[in-house]
Each structure stands twice: as C-alpha cells, then as structure tokens.
Image: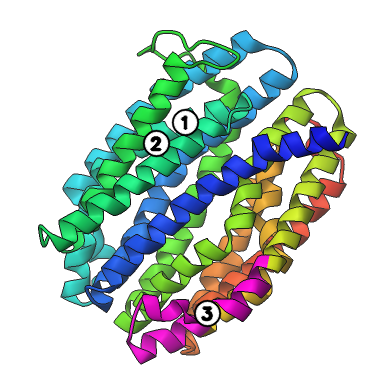
Amino acid sequence: MKSIKNSKFINLYLPVTLEQTFSTISTMLGTMLISGLGSYASAGIGMVDQINFLFMSVLTCIASGITAVISQCVGSSDIKKAKDCANHSLTISIYASIIISLFLIFFRNILLSFLFGKAEQKVLDSASIYLFFTSISLPFLTLFNVFTGIRRATGDNLSPLIGAFLSNIVYVIVSLFCMNYLNMGISSVGFGLFTSRLVSFLILLYFVYFRPRLFTMPKLTFKTKYNILKPVLDIAVPNSIDGIVFNGGKLLVQVFMSGMGTASLSANTIANSIANLVQLPSKTFLITCVPATGNAFGSGDMEKTKKVMLSQTFWASITQLIVNIFFFVFCQKIYFLYSSDKTVLIYTKVLVDSFLVLTPIFWATSFMTPSALRATGDAKFTMRISIISLFLFRVFFSWLLGVYLNFGIYGIWCSMYIDWIFRSIFYLTRVFSKKWHIKN
C-alpha cells in the first residue's frame, strides 16, 4: 500500500509541483526584469494581467471542463465519449481564442484608456506594449491549456511538466537576450512570453497527437456538435460566467487602484508575484484536485469523492502553512530583488505578510474546494456563490475601504480576505451536504 501511495505521489503531485515551480520562477524573473525598468513598467504589467485574467477566464474554463469530463469518462471507462469531447473542445477553443486575440490587439489602447485613464502615461504606454504580445500569443496559451487538460485527465502529468520546463527556459533566455543585447525594453519580456507560449503549444501538440495516452485524437473537426460538447459546456459555461464576473470584478478593483499612485500599483504587482511563488503547494493541489475528484465521481462512489475533496483541501492548507513559515523566516530579502524604492518595498512587505498569515486558513477552502465541486458537475452553485461574494464583499469593500475610507492598497487586499472567508463558509458547507451528488 505504501508503494502505491508513493507511486501516486510521484506520478501525480511531483510533476505538477515541478511544473508550477518552473512557471512561477520564470514569471518572477520576468517581473524582476520589468521592475528594473522602473515602477511604471511593473505597474503597467499589473494592469494588463487583470485584463488577461478576464478574457482567459473564458478560455481556461473550456480546459477545466474537458479535464473534468474526460476524468469522469476514464472513471466510467467511456473512452469514445472522452475522445469526442476532447476533439470538439479543441475546435471551439481555437475559434474563441482567435476572436478574443484579435479584439485585444486592435482595441487594446481604447480599452486601457477607458479602464485606467487616471494612470500616468508611461504606465499606459508600457501596458499597451505588453498587452500586444500577450494578445498575439493567446491562442497558443489556450491550446496548451486544453492539451494539458486532456493529458492530465488521462493520468499524464509528465508531458505538461516537459512543456513548462522547456518553454520557461526559452522565456528567460529570450527575454534576457532581447533586453541586454537588443535593448528592447518592456518588449523583451513580451517577446519572450510569445516565444515560450509557442514552444509550450508545440510540445503538447506533439504529445497529444503523436504520443497518445488511452485514446488517439481523431482528425480535427471544424464543425462542432452541441450534444457532444454539452457535458463540457455544462461545466465550462457556469465556470466561465463565474470567471468572467470574478475577474471583471477584480478588473474593476484594479480601476480603483489606478488612482492610488504608481507606487501602489507597482507594490501590488510585486506582491502578487511573490504570492505566486509562496502558493506553489496550493496551486499544485488546485490542479490535481480536478482529475482526482472527477475520476472518483465518475466511478460512482460518492463517499470516496467526498474524501478526495476534503483530503486535497486539508493537505493543501497544511503544506501551505509550512511553506509560509519557511518563507517568513528565511526569505525576507527577496523584496530587494524587485525594487529599491522604499515606498514600494514598505507597501509590498505589508501585503505579503498579511497573505502569509491568511492563505493557509482560507485560500484552499475558497478556491480549491469549488474547483473540486465543479469536477462533479456542481458548477451552477459555485458560480452563484462566487458572483454574490465578489460584488458584495470584494468590489464593495474595495471601494469602501480602499477609496471611500482612503486605506488605499491595504483596503483593497483586506476586501480580498473578506471575500475568501465568505466563500470558504459556503463551499465547505456544500461539500458536507449531499446536494452535489446530483449532476447539475
């Protein structure tokens, strides 16, 4: 039994952990490079990230839906259904990503001016350049996510690891070369990102089509059938609405922040970058909980499914606590790698310290638990709670604390924590109920 558990750890959790580690470290290095160009550059990237999160919420939901459905199909041994869903999901992802990409490329300056007109012009200029590169590479990222979802649902976490490892090496090398030898400024990181997304897409394309696992992908279809896509859309559409509203609310919060000064915007970007590093354990469990829960649910064993959801949430919180303590004790000098601006550093440290205290308590239950619920098809409930919590707590309290009461960036992050607490209460209550047993 012990060897089985060790094998499961090596095959499931370790590859995902390494993949997330490579991605996070390369992203951090990119943020450090940009921060070296000045606070306006990191502030611009922070604004673009919120726009990207909004539009990517539509596209990543398809990948999440296909992961959950194929996991259920594997659990019930329905391989034909898994194959058809994967093929049609790939087609709809191509169409959606190209449309969104073209929209962002041609309307990016109008969008930035409308949302962040209060920001300094240098910040807006940096944001426009970076948004161009993230937009043209969006289809590659989307297809990489879909291919990754297909592979993970069939039990393969190694190919996404290979894709992440090689693409992130490309990202760092290309970004450094463009910055140090071609003097491309903020375009350096943008071009590095484009190249890395192209590489990751090609690697996963190779594995899905030329190294199949459990089933061989059929020839790509250009016509989609609703009856085949329905199981995916039943999860993806509510999840997509949830993501659009959630990231739209965060974008609105970013609009509030745009009037708080470049130092606050820069600190927010740096704090989020450090938070991504600290959250490696939670992000690993966030990814693995979907196929694990979907597979258990597909087998028809509801008690086992419940145990999987709770155990994943529990261990995510425990490992997060250990990492947070280690970071607080040994990694305090990491702030100076991003900036030498004292105001930015003070803001950043307060934000990260609060994050270290509260993530082990509330993050997994507010974000990982609903992902597990969606894997059972209980997407409509998680969507409703997310929307209510977003507007009632995160958006309203961001305005109240951050703008009206003038607590600035601290008020923005405080509202985020209030949002986490509300979500945790309702999602945990749902897991202990029997309502998710019925497919929605």
Q: In the image, 143: left or right of 390? A: left
Crowding at dot 2, Cα within 10 Å, few <14 / some 14-19 / many 20+, comes out as many
Percent x, y for residue 431?
81, 47
Magenta stretch: includes residue 122: no
Q: Which span of residues is magenta-colored?
A: 323-349
Q: Is residue 387 above or below residue 103?
A: below
Q: In the image, 318: left or right of 267? A: right
Dot 2 lies on which element? helix
Residue 433 figure quarter: top right
Residue 269 figure quarter: bottom left
Q: Are marks 2 and 1 in contact (CB under 8 Å)?
A: yes
Whether residue 29 can be seen here = yes
Specify the label residue 146 is tagged with: 1
Residue bearing mark 2? 142
Q: Residue at horizontal 25%, vertical 70%?
A: 41
Percent x, y for residue 186?
20, 62
State the colouring used for the structure image: rainbow
Residue bearing mark 3? 351
Looking at marks 2 and 3 on the same chain, the residue that comes earlier in the sequence is marked by 2
Residue 11 figure quarter: top right
Q: Is residue 249 above or below residue 11?
A: below
Q: Residue at horizontal 35%, vertical 76%?
A: 266
